[in-house]
Image (cartoon, helix red, strand yellow):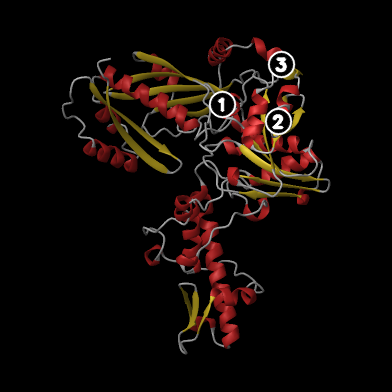
């Protein structure tokens, strides 16, 4: 994404790609907000789709302003000037000026309202194989991730929260931790305990030395079995109708009905870079260093927690070592600020242990998907699909939760690629007790594609059809996906004999504007 967005802007700007330097934007929804969501967020695999037009327009406008600034300095007609490789040139005289020398004057001009954009056939960067702008520094260690931040006088902290969501600290004796060399402070809050030290090792050893008693509260009695029982019961009811074409009930009653249910568990993110946040809190300001997918929300929630004006909360965003939706949550910043509130203004880096990360994640929802279908002429005649699970959208982006439908939970279900005359999709919101849920690598597609594609294999077997042939017959209205399926069939030698204990599986998926077909060959060993 870093390189791609830079290419889009540089293309219309006619900048010298070799001179492009990336810089994180500060929090400002109005200036830098994602056009799709209205806030400054990286997610939903839509950075290029969302910023394609705005970045092209911005680049074209800036190019026009630079040309106008040069023309004014040279007292020539802007139409007699061109821009390329970071320079403005006057055709008649051969004079030239770099963008940098013209930037000041250009910034004082009014941007053109509708600058003309390039014809794609004239692209010099987009569509070309270019070096990524961030690779070199990732290889040589020059990239500073959130966890790499080091500040003068900085302390280190790690924390432990209740093993049950909603639990509180009942009792803890700080003595054993305070006896660890390098431990500076034990902070006991209502729902967590943090140990602050001169270095991470001291903080971690100090935390491990503590014997914390927890009041686990009402959620202590909730089990996985309880959650699944509630989910299954909820799935028996009617849901909000997300899509309805044809007459599914009538079609299902006119043929042999095949049914299946798929259950998918809660999933943790397990990002490569541990959750971390560095904070320096002073009476009149708060400065934060972290890698986040939603910088403005971090700024806003921290301002709320501290009572500081928004402009007094500064957030420095860094590259993230894996987001996957986990860093769409501000909780790591909030917990770090709560620790900093008990210090004397020195910066503190709070790092979650892997155990805390896994146990206190914001999990991909557990889902129960029920499907019923009939076949006619070797293809699906009718299909009824119901998704039951938690709504991330209702919590994270309430305005998008309309008519009882979580648009993310039904993604790749309402727009499944198959040409099915009678199709009905429902969503049942069922919130689990004691388990927070969040975005996880796509959420809807990684649930719905799994269930639908597994069911397609079951139906293909019922119809006596090859899995790819069965799908091909229903992809007439999706030529790009059909082409991808044909290509993957060719590349995988689909249909050719396989060794013993070896099989092939296929799946197709249109998601986030891409068309994906996959064949996996798997071998089961004798053990």
Do tag 2 and tag 3 residues touch (Cβ < 8 Å)?
Answer: no
Compute the Cα span from label 2 to label 1. Answer: 19 Å
- The residue carrying pointer 1 sits among few (fewer than 14), some (14 to 19) or many (20 or more) residues within 10 Å by Cα, namely some
Is 128 situated above or below 411?
below
Judged from this view, the residue extending furthest toward the bottom is 93
Judged from this view, the residue extending furthest toward the left is 497
| Residue linked to disc 2 | 195
- Dot 3: what SS? strand
Is 102 situated above or below 380?
below
Q: Quadrant of the C terminus?
A: top left
Q: Which of marks 1 and 3 precedes in the sequence? A: 3
Q: Which of marks 1 and 2 precedes in the sequence? A: 2
Q: Position of residue 330 (x, y in %)?
A: 66, 37
Q: Can residue 117 be seen in this view?
A: no
- Dot 1: what SS? helix
20 vs 466, nearest the viewer: 20
- Dot 2: what SS? strand
Compute the Cα span from label 3 to label 1. Answer: 19 Å
Please tell me the numbered disc located at residue 214: 3
- The residue carrying pointer 3 sits among few (fewer than 14), some (14 to 19) or many (20 or more) residues within 10 Å by Cα, namely some
Q: Position of residue 398 (x, y in %)?
A: 66, 34
């Amino acid at each position: 994404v870093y390189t791609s967005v830079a290419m889009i802007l540089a293309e219309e700007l006619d900048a010298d790609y070799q001179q492009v330097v990336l810089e994180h934007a500060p929090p400002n929804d109005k200036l830098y907000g994602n056009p799709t969501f209205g806030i400054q967020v990286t997610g939903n695999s839509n950075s290029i789709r969302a910023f394609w037009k705005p970045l092209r327009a911005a680049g074209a406008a800036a190019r026009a302003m630079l040309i106008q600034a040069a023309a004014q300095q040279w007292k020539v007609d802007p139409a007699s000037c061109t821009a390329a490789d970071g320079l403005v040139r006057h055709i008649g005289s051969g004079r030239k000026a770099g963008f940098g020398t013209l930037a000041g004057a250009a910034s004082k001009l009014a941007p053109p309202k509708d600058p003309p954009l390039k014809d794609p056939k004239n692209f010099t960067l987009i569509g070309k194989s270019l070096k990524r702008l961030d690779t070199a520094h990732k290889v040589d260690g020059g990239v500073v991730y959130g966890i790499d931040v080091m500040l003068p006088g900085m302390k280190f902290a790690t924390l432990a929260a209740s093993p049950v969501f909603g639990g509180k600290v009942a009792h803890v004796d700080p003595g054993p931790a305070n006896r660890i060399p390098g431990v500076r402070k034990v902070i006991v809050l209502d729902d967590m305990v943090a140990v602050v030290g001169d270095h991470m090792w001291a903080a971690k050893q100090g935390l491990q030395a503590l014997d914390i008693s927890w009041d686990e509260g009402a959620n202590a009695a909730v089990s996985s079995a309880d959650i699944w029982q509630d989910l299954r019961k909820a799935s028996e009811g009617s849901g909000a109708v997300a899509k309805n074409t044809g007459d599914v009930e009538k079609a299902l009653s006119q043929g042999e009905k095949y049914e299946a249910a798929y259950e998918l568990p809660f999933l943790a993110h397990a990002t490569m870079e541990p959750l971390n946040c560095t904070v320096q809190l002073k009476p009149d300001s708060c400065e934060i260093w972290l890698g986040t997918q939603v910088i403005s929300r971090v700024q806003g929630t921290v301002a709320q927690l501290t009572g500081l004006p928004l402009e007094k909360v500064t957030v420095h965003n860094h590259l993230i070592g894996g987001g996957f939706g986990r860093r769409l949550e501000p909780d790591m910043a909030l917990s770090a600020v709560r620790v900093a509130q008990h210090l004397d203004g020195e910066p503190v880096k709070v790092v979650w242990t892997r155990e805390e990360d896994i146990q206190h994640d914001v999990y991909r929802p557990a889902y129960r998907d029920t499907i019923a279908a009939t076949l006619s002429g070797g293809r699906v005649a009718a299909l009824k699909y119901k998704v039951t699970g938690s709504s991330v959208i209702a919590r994270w982006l309430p305005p998008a939760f309309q008519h009882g439908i979580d648009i993310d939970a039904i993604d790749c279900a309402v727009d499944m690629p198959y040409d099915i005359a009678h199709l009905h999709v429902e969503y049942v919101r069922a919130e689990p007790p004691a388990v927070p849920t969040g975005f996880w690598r796509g959420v809807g597609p990684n649930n719905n594609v799994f269930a639908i594609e597994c069911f397609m294999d079951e139906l293909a077997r019922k119809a006596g059809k090859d899995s790819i042939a069965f799908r091909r017959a229903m992809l007439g209205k999706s030529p790009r996906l059909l082409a991808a399926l044909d290509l993957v069939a060719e590349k995988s030698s689909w249909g050719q004999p396989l060794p013993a204990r070896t099989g092939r599986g296929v799946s197709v998926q249109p998601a986030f504007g891409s068309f994906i077909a996959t064949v996996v060959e798997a071998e089961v060993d004798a053990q």
